[in-house]
Image (tube, rainbow, N blue to C red):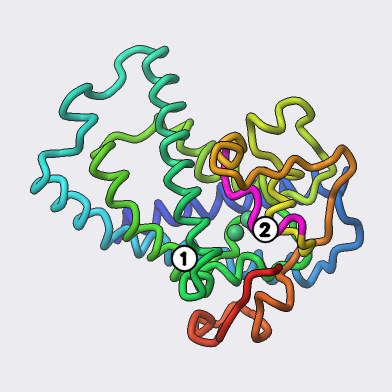
Amino acid sequence: MEAFVSNYLSILGSSALLTVLFFCLEGARPAESGQPFAKWLRNVAYLPFILAWILALQLVITPAAAALLRVTGGGLLPRFIGAPRTLVGEVLFFLGFALTWDVWQYWVHRWQHTSPLLWRTHALHHAESALNATAQARHHPTNYVLFAVLYTPMLLVFGGLGPHPVGAFVLFRVWGFVNHANLRVGFGRATRLIAGPQWHRIHHSTRKEHADRNFAAYFPFIDAVFGTYYEPKADEYPPTGATVERMAVRVGFEPTLPFRVKRFSRPS
Ligand SMILES: [Zn+2]
Ligand SMILES: [Zn+2]
């Protein structure tokens, strides 16, 4: 219990610091000015609950994953290659892990958009009409259950191996803030290489030409490979939210949300 509380406080603390940092950055160069403060506050108020949920879920996932690895022999990579031992090995492992994770995440995410049932786990995230860094944790609890269950193939490849804690922090804490930041910042020639605020904003756009585009979390070229890549024009910062076609009812933070979103149709 003590470990749970200290883990929770450290994750909550780092998230709070990042929230404040990005709030200041967004104020300096916003993609969209005049976002309602109440919406920002609502996402911030949701943060302690969703972080507690993620950690509680891990209490179930960790022993289940350990049991699965015992049965299957510990994962392919640890069995045949082992953990990286040099700095170069660590960097290569980090890149390999990030790329594999993003390809896997791409397909789970894309499935959430194409399946009416799975869309219900993702609708809350897209219902944000004033996109900013606080949306990084604006996910329904069922979204994390889905990702945990579908993580099994990744587990069988990587076993207990994961990136260095610094790399994991960048991938799983910082980059969500970067992607959702309300920042007028494009990555220019690196747009196809690394995901950022302008590129992910297209994914949240209400415009038809942007629908079901840019699913990757870190590497936009994954979308290019699978035919869903959209390169924003230099000054393209569209309005965000979910189109009426996708939302049958108003979407809030209610736990019953997945059971209330009745239907959605793909925008033509
Ligand atoms: Zn999405
Ligand atoms: Zn997003």
Q: Is residue 96 above or below residue 115?
A: above
Given residues 89 and 173, the one toward you in this image is 89
User: Which of the image's four quarters has the N terminus?
Assistant: bottom left
Q: Is residue 169 magenta?
A: no
* The residue stretch that appears in magenta: 209-218
Q: Nearer the viewer, mark 2 or mark 1?
A: 1
At horizontal 47% and vertical 75% (from top left) the residue drawn is 117
Q: Which mark is residue 214?
A: none
Q: What residue lies at 71% left-to-right and 68% top-to-bottom?
A: 268
Count of numbered circles on the image: 2
Q: Which percent across, then down, holds residue 39?
A: 75, 70
Q: Main secondary structure of the magenta part?
A: loop
Residue 236 falls left or right of residue 83: right
What numbered label is drawn on residue 143?
1
Q: Residue 103: x, y in percent?
A: 46, 41
Question: Which of 29/267 is in front?
Answer: 267
Which residue is pictured at 60% across the width and 48% down the height?
A: 176
Q: Determine if the C-beta at disc 1 is less than 8 A from ligand 1.
A: no
User: Which quadrant does ligand 1 occupy?
Assistant: bottom right
Whether residue 251 can be seen here: yes
Question: Looking at the image, can residue 48 be seen?
Answer: no
Mark 2 falls on what kind of element? helix
